[in-house]
Amino acid sequence: MTTDDGPTKFPAKIRIISPTSIHVPRWNQPSAHRRDSKNLQFHTGIGYSPGHWGEIVQGWLRHNGELIVALLTLVDRTYGTTAVAIPRRGTGVFSSQAEKWKAFKAAYLTLEALGVKTGLSFRLRSTIPIGVGGGSSTSDCTALGRAIIAAVGASGKPITDLELLQKIVFAAEGACDPLPLLDWGLPLLWASRAGKVLHVFSRPLPQLYALGFVTEPGRMVSTDALASAQAKLAVPQADVDRFAKILQTLDMAIATGAALGVGEAATASGTLNQKHCPIAHWDDLCKLAEKVGAVGTSCSHSGTAAALLWDPATDNLAARVAEATAEVQQLGATYIHEFRPS
């Protein structure tokens, strides 16, 4: 909702202040430590978060007797979100970007975690295409959380715990990739719908070179709707077993620094996911990967983003990438770009 009178105020009925799923340290609890905006010095805060380009792998994993969705994010720093947070008198969160309702939730949760009571205005500027599986809303929430911390953190208790920011983002999103945890520096197997780290891999991801693109321009996939639909389906044991083997391949590849193994795992995971969220021209893309000497093909498991992956040491890499670019253009792809996953 927007009005001619000014920026929209987030509807009170959707304000989520302190859900039980978030552990807030005692010094952040809204008690005597919480202070009003009067007599406190605030500043305009700026925060940034990159997006991602789907996942290297994603599938169903049996963990502690329960089936959960596990993934490894394919980080793409080509696109991202910049957030500006401006403290203001009073209470409530304001923005003219009413469609960014998850960011509103993240704003309230961040203010509560900081233990500071103040009004806030924000603005988001994102270059991430929406609905393709590039983490646009997760990037919004992460960037805004960082902007708010920069704006009011010095007046409250600073949030230096990456896991706390991740919990805030997860509570705002309901399902997300672990963008706030990228500074850990090691790849994470992440339970996207449970909001927890399942495994920290022993080494950084092997160096890769990627050609990313959107396979179906104009088609938008709702992650929330897809997750809801999948939750109603029985997961075949064969799929669980297959994903377990994919994770074994991935773990070995990361442990040995083998880009080829990462590519094999990505291709296998994407192929397994075609029954849930098909990628246009998937078979053609896998054949193209072989033709141009790529180690594999990755995709968003809940969108239309895909990528060809190479070992950066591949001979004549520039020529191979140029050939692949021409081929995906012929398939009608958009947002074609090169990046180094990290």
Image: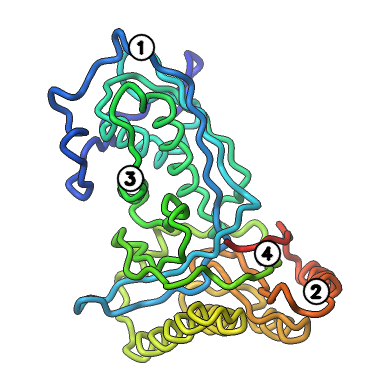
Name which of mark 3 and mark 4 comes first in the sequence.
3
Between residue 157 and residue 330, name the one nearer to us.
Answer: 157
Name which of mark 1 and mark 4 comes first in the sequence.
1
- Asked if the residue at tag 4 contacts the one at tag 1, i.e. Cβ–Cβ closer than 8 Å, the answer is no
SS assignment at label 2: helix
Between residue 333 and residue 3, name the one nearer to us.
Answer: 333
Residue type, label 4: Gly
Mark 1 Cα within 10 Å, few/some/many (few <14, many 20+)? few
Q: Which mark is residue 212?
A: 4
Between residue 290 and residue 313, name the one nearer to us.
Answer: 313
Residue 172, position as x, y percentages in the image: 34, 45
Name which of mark 2 and mark 4 comes first in the sequence.
4
Q: Tell me the distance, in whole angstroms, between the alpha carbons under discs 1 and 3.
A: 28 Å
Name which of mark 1 and mark 3 comes first in the sequence.
1
Q: Is residue 48 left or right of residue 311?
A: left
Residue, disc 1: 89
Mark 2 Cα within 10 Å, few/some/many (few <14, many 20+)? some
Q: Residue at x 48, y 74 (%)?
A: 57
- Identify the image's colour scheme: rainbow, by chain, secondary structure or one colour: rainbow
* Closer to viewer: mark 2 or mark 4: 2
Mark 3 Cα within 10 Å, few/some/many (few <14, many 20+)? few
Residue type, label 1: Arg
Q: Tell me the distance, in whole angstroms, between the alpha carbons under discs 1 and 4.
A: 44 Å
30 lies above or below 137: above
Residue 260, position as x, y percentages in the image: 62, 83
Between residue 37 and residue 271, name the one nearer to us.
Answer: 37
SS assignment at label 4: strand
Q: Residue at x 26, y 38 (%)?
A: 16
Q: Residue furthest left?
A: 32
37 lies above or below 64: above
Residue type, label 3: Asp
